[in-house]
Amino acid sequence: MASLSIRIDLDPDGRVGPGKIALLEAIARTGSISAAGRAMDMSYKRAWDLVDELGRIFDQPVVTSQAGGRHGGGARLTPFGEELIARYREIEQLAAAAVRPHLDALQANTPRESLAARRGLPVRTG
């Protein structure tokens, strides 16, 4: 089934898309930037850089973190980080609903076997 992927381009150079939102959701789930990064097959540095980039884009933190130590470290979303996810997911749902007839029409005109399968490449699922 055809789907829509949303990337929001903000002035001047900020971008928010499915990867950054998925990272924030993973941080919320795991309570850790490093665990979220591992869950997404990315390094801690890459995960931290993306979190930091979101903070710079919006001029406010999206995650608060506590350094490791006797009681361990951790991370959680700020209220704005939670709002960012909610707004992004709402935009995504509204856009998907608006374009569904067009996506269905395009999908109806594609062969049943995917191009990747015809080329003998691994087929991406999910």
Image: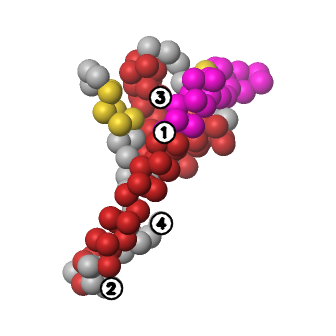
Give SS at disc 4: loop
Reading the image, the residue beneath label 4 is: 126
For the magenta stretch, what is the residue range? 65-88
* Residue at x 44% of width, y 14% of height: 59
Does residue 53 show up? Answer: yes
In the displayed structure, does residue 99 sit left or right of residue 37? left
Give SS at disc 1: helix
* Residue at x 52% of width, y 44% of height: 89
Reading the image, the residue beneath label 1 is: 88
Residue 51: give its label: 3
Answer with mark 1 or mark 2, whichever residue precedes in sequence.
1
Instruction: Please provide percent x and percent y for residue 37.
Output: 51, 42
| Amino acid, disc 3 | Val
| Amino acid, disc 1 | Tyr
Reading the image, the residue beneath label 2 is: 112
Answer with mark 3 or mark 2, whichever residue precedes in sequence.
3
Q: CA distance from mark 1 to mark 4?
A: 20 Å
In the displayed structure, does residue 30 sit left or right of residue 13? right
Question: Which numbered disc, 4 or 2, marks the residue closer to the eye?
Answer: 2
